[in-house]
Image (spheres, helix red, strand yellow):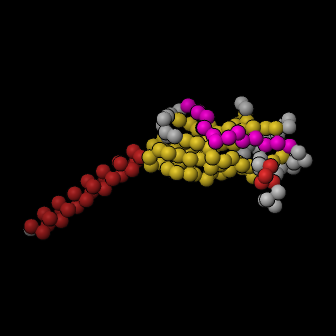
Amino acid sequence: MDWLKAILLTALFSATVVNLNTEAFAADRGSCRRGERLQIQDLDMRPDPVVEGQHVRAWRLNLRFDGRGECTTNLYVREGNNIVGTLRNFAIHTGTNEIEVPAIDSFRFRGRETCFNVQVDLEGSKRAVDAERRFCATQRTVWSMRAPEDRNARK
């Protein structure tokens, strides 16, 4: 009979520990909060370059997250007041995240230079993410976001 009590106590203790670990993990992976450090390290488009009449398929960005654990958020690539790419319920983890955001089909380049920024949903409100530099596409014969020194290196 003592062995039965030992098995029941072990099972009860194990269930309690598993439940506590699940709750701790769920707390680490909530929605992203204000005050957590986010930074865009790079933003590119696919394909690059884009010829006249061609669509941008996706935006590729490197996002650095210095928070703890993971958090889930919505990402928006914007050109001025226009949303040109959206990714919903993306789980951001600590460190650098390589993310591909689907482009909006109706987006078209205009003017000689078009600049972009990224926003995230923090506690229900959109906030621009800090960036190391400006991310702009310029038109020469084609639209490109590559830096001038990279244009000849990537063929």
Instruction: Give the quarter of the image for residue 120.
Output: top right
Residue 133 is a magenta residue: yes
**Total number of numbered discs in the rendering:** 0
Residue 111 visible: yes
Describe residue 31's horizontal placement relative to residue 149 as left or right.
left
Image point (39%, 44%), residue name = 27
Instruction: Look at the image and tell me in which quarter the N terminus lies.
Output: bottom left
Magenta region's main secondary structure? strand
**Which residue is nearer to you in this view: 116 or 32?**
116
Question: Residue 61, percent across and down?
Answer: 65, 48
Describe residue 9's horizontal placement relative to residue 117 as left or right.
left
Instruction: Give the quarter of the image for residue 7.
Output: bottom left
Describe residue 111's horizontal placement relative to residue 2 as left or right.
right
Question: Residue 55, percent across and down?
Answer: 81, 48
Residue 144 is a magenta residue: no
Image point (81%, 54%), residue name = 151
**Which residue is nearer to you in this view: 43 or 126?**
43
Image point (79%, 52%), residue name = 149
Instruction: Look at the image and tell me in which quarter the C terminus lies.
Output: bottom right
Q: Which residue appears farthest toward the front when viewing the image? A: 149
Q: Which residue appears farthest toward the right when viewing the image? A: 141
Q: Is residue 18 above or below residue 3?
A: above
**Which residue is nearer to you in this view: 72 or 133?**
133
Residue 48 visible: no
Question: Residue 103, percent across and down?
Answer: 72, 46
Image point (62%, 44%), residue name = 40
Question: Residue 130, percent across and down?
Answer: 60, 38
**Which residue is nearer to you in this view: 142 or 23?**
142
- The part of the chain drawn in magenta is 125-139
